[in-house]
Image (cartoon, coloured by chain):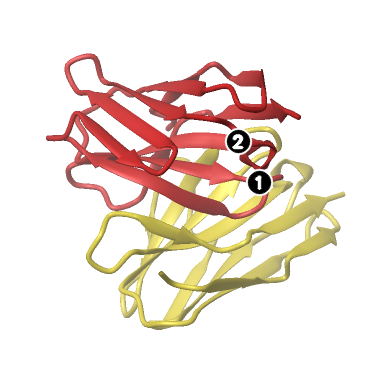
Amino acid sequence: SAVISQKPSRDICQRGTSLTIQCQVDSQVTMMFWYRQQPGQSLTLIATANQGSEATYESGFVIDKFPISRPNLTFSTLTVSNMSPEDSSIYLCSVDGQGSDTQYFGPGTRLTVL
Amino acid sequence: SQQGEEDPQALSIQEGENATMNCSYKTSINNLQWYRQNSGRGLVHLILIRSNEREKHSGRLRVTLDTSKKSSSLLITASRAADTASYFCATVGRWADGLTFGKGTHLIIQP
């Protein structure tokens, strides 16, 4: 299994600002995923990030709002841009299980926008 | 969009009892997985069942899958206080790699 860390673990931000969340994996992985979990809700896939190509966004999520970088096989960032209180959520990254369909999740970043 | 629907949304039982959670989905799937989340933190993978499987066991966990009804169930036997968590089913479609999660069941084990 992969060990995944995220930074920051939590943050409180002002509306209109941007926050970049980092996701680091202890091994090289092909695919990384970013999910959002709004308060009291389930997880929703934001985008899939493959190294060396543009991220693929799910319906309802756009690159201008959630730009993603994937500079190498162990690292990715998600930026939440021009934040509003509706962006208050837990943001989680995950990686594919390298040969299995299971995914390994990071601990999440709890974002509060005031 | 959310595909899975968990039933019940919340479940409270006594320690030692069995807990059953159900999940329904809408589209064709490659496999169905169950995850646990403690206190809004990262998810832990519990078990995966493929579309050509009907039942799978792992320790105190038993998962069933009925593709004709597009439903799955997760049974936790001999529950423990440490099983208190939210449980989510998640599906992988035939062409997609990301997971589509259900709404989740919040399980509380009373000591």
Chain corresponding to red in the figure: B
Q: Quadrant of the C terminus of chain B?
A: top right
What quarter of the picture does the N terminus of chain B occupy?
Answer: top left
Mark 1 crowd level (few <14, some 14–19, many ≥20, 10 Å Cα) = some
Vertically, is A52 above or below A45? below
Q: Residue type at mark 2?
A: Ser
Q: Chain of mark 2?
A: B
Q: Nearer the viewer, residue A58 or A35?
A: A35
B65 versus A86 height, above or below: above
Give the residue at x 75% y 47%: A84
Task: Identify the mark at residue B29; answer none if there is no mark.
Answer: none
Q: Along the horizontal axis of the image, is A92 left or right of B22? A: right
Q: Which residue is mark 2?
A: B86
For the point 54% across and 43% down, the residue is B36
Amino acid type, residue under disc 1 in the picture: Asn
- Residue A97, percent across and down? 33, 64
Give percent across and percent down for residue B73. 37, 24
Q: Secondary structure at mark 1?
A: loop
The residue depicted at 69 percent of the width and 47 percent of the height is A87
Residue lying at the far left in this picture: please name it.
B52
Q: Is residue A63 above or below residue B104?
A: below
Residue A110 picture quarter: bottom right
Mark sitting earlier along the chain (1/2): 1
The residue under label 1 is: B38
Q: Is residue A56 visible?
A: yes
Q: Position of residue B67 (x, y in %)?
A: 19, 23
Look at the image and tell me whether residue A64 can be seen: no
Which colour denotes chain A? yellow
Q: Find out whether the residues at labels 1 and 2 contact each other: C-beta distance under 8 Å.
A: yes
The image quarter in which residue A107 lies: bottom right
**In x, y percent, where is residue A20?**
66, 70
Left or right: residue A48 compared with residue B36: left
